[in-house]
Amino acid sequence: MKTVQRVRIKQVRDGRVRFAVEEIKGPNEVYQAVLPYYRSEDREVLSAIYLDARASPVCFHIVSVGTLNTTRTQPLDVLKPAILSNASALILIHNHPSGDTEPSGEDIAFTRNMHRACELLGVELHDHLVISDQGFVSIRSRGLI
């Protein structure tokens, strides 16, 4: 008879972060909340804000740190914290160190893949923001998801 490990999955909290806004109602509040964590980053960083059923943030997670002009990740890396934190929705954020906030073709394709993955798990993808120190673009506001 073969034996396998019995496991218990638990989220490990890694401190707390302060957001400059109390409530996230739209992309501008997301931008204001995360900008301090992105200021002067010289590499692309992908993060997510995970939300409860009332669209209130329950956690913030740096998903991936990449290179000057790309960051790669899989839907699993984004969705695991959503499941562990009992989130019902999430917002993706990544920066463009060049300052150009125009979403690339890869950004749009990744967002659409994430949208499909989120739908399969019953987690809503509210938006994906491309940010820089100068501003942001909401992929949802552009009608791309």
Image (tube, grey):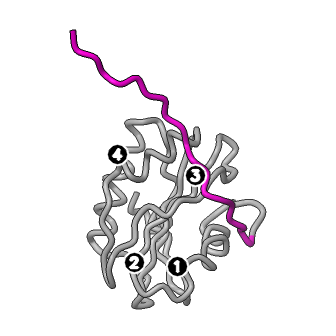
Which comes before the other along the chain, label 1 or label 2? 2
Q: Position of residue 125 (x, y in %)?
A: 48, 51
Q: Which mark is residue 136?
A: 1
Which comes before the other along the chain, label 3 or label 2? 2
The prevailing secondary structure element of the residues shown in magenta is: loop
- Disc 3 residue crowd, few under 14, some 14–19, many 20+, Cα 10 Å: many
Q: Amino acid at mark 2?
A: Glu
Q: CA distance from mark 3 to mark 4?
A: 17 Å
Which comes before the other along the chain, label 1 or label 4? 4
The residue lying at 56 percent from left, 85 percent from top is 39
Pointer 3 with pointer 4, Cβ within 8 A: no
Q: Amino acid at mark 4?
A: Arg
Magenta segment: does it hold 126?
no
Q: Residue under circle 3?
A: 50
Q: Quadrant of residue 33?
A: bottom right
Single out the residue that lies furthest toward the left. 1
At numbered mark 3, what does the secondary structure look like: helix, strand or loop?
strand
Q: Residue under circle 2?
A: 44
At numbered mark 1, what does the secondary structure look like: helix, strand or loop?
strand
Q: Position of residue 118 (x, y in %)?
A: 41, 44
